[in-house]
Amino acid sequence: MSFCVTRPVFALLTLPLLFATGCKTPAKVDPAPVPTAKISEPETLPPWIDMPLSWEKLRTIELWIAAQDAGQRDYWLVEGELQLAGGRLELSRRDLSQEKARGNTDMLTTRIKAARLGMEKISQDASANPSQRTRASDGIARADRMLSELGKPALTLGVPLVARAQWGAAPAISANLTRNKGGWKRITVHHSAEADPVPLDGSLESSSEGLRQIQRSHLKSKQPPWGDIGYHFLIDPQGRVFQGRELAWQGAHASGNNNIQNIGVCLLGNFEEEHPTPEALASLGKLLDNLRRVYSIPRREVHTHQEFKSTACPGKNLEPWVERYSENEAQKSRTSTKSGPQASAKPSEASSPKSNSTSGTKSPMKNSGKASGKTAGKSAANTKKTVN
Ligand SMILES: [Zn+2]
């Protein structure tokens, strides 16, 4: 990247400025955010810190963030994300009245939603300092005001998230991850069903150790190596929702191209043998509702793993819940439209991991007769003791 070459020059230019504006002496007058812990070495100062707000600056921040190690979250990485989200909001505010007058607010709404999600993530990020989290909360409120001005509902994931730092996630290896492109179009539900699971005693620590074990196995025993835990969200029996793989990245949970634009949600437990708790199901319902709302995903695009692959996942005691959840709208769309690319999918395709098209836009079985698909999944579950 070109700024790798220019970074020392930026450092030379910005360092005196920083001192001049009191960045190192926060007690006085400077109202700007001040790093209170672990300030990066001067030569690593990011290239965007002195740029005036513009789309060019936001592009520079985006490129800089992409070049950072996603697992090494520090002050500057959080600051970059914060300024990116804040910049998107401010530039959107400037366009608001004009776009509203034109009556075409879709792009603006998408931009504000993206900024709001960025702010929401920072507000719950243990590696953000208190001042950054406060600015993120202010940003969320600001985004909500703008959305409401556009006549759109406020957005939130609706559940408190246990951040990666809180559960002790190992750093993600971005070289082994694929960026998610084009938003999210479906969600797949799993159970963890490990061969030798960590015993859960209800504490946050035991669930965290459970997640760390899953992450270790995903990082170490996959070929080619995975860059992180495969799921985007995990839910423990107490209903705590954990941030897994960041939503910036495509997941690794539904086999090959089935992972494209597919959010992976995993409940801790083996639901071939036990039943999910009401707390876990309540959180799953809220998370699915809110992910669908945020990403405009229809109910019928909420799937079980066994719809993509011959596996018992998510287990006979969780599978009916997911089917019921997605059924309502699938029923409606079957009676109202009857058509669509999925109508031709054969039930047998469900048992082949690679059978789904590479388009990433449709899933194999819903709408094509759930009953037959379900039967295929069931028989697969009965004949094959596969895992997650
Ligand atoms: Zn699974």
Image: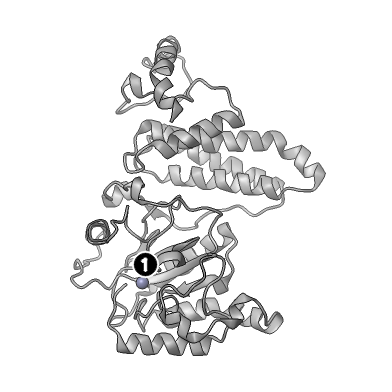
- Give the position of the N terminus as an image quadrant: top left
Image coordinates of residue 29 in percent, x first then y, are 46, 14
Q: Residue at x 58, y 29 (%)?
A: 56
- Label 1 environment density (alpha carbons within 10 Å; few <14, some 14–19, many ≥20): many
Which residue does the image show at 43% across and 39% down from the upper left? 66
Location of the C terminus by quadrant is: bottom left
Please give the residue where the numbered disc 1 appears in the rendered image: 266
How many callouts does the rendering have? 1
Which sits in the foreground, 329 or 54? 54
Q: Is residue 132 visible?
A: no
Position of residue 148 in the picture relative to residue 374 (left or right)? right
Q: Is mark 1 within 8 Å of ligand 1?
A: yes
Q: Residue 291 placed where, x, y %?
A: 52, 61
Q: Quadrant of ligand 1?
A: bottom left
Q: Is residue 153 above or below residue 18?
A: below
Q: Quadrant of residue 70?
A: top left
Q: Residue at x 62, y 45 (%)?
A: 111
Residue at 37 percent across and 14 percent down: it is 25
Using the image, determine if residue 232 lies above or below residue 369.
Answer: above
Residue type at the position of mark 1: Cys
The secondary structure type at the circle numbered 1 is: strand
Is 179 or 96 nearer to us in this picture?
Answer: 179
Left or right: 349 in relation to 387: right
From the top left corner, tell me how far across and down residue 52 is, in percent: 57, 22
Q: Which of the 4 image quarters holds residue 368?
A: bottom right
Q: Taking 139 as reference, is 33 above or below it?
A: above
Q: Does residue 53 lie above or below 29 as drawn?
A: below
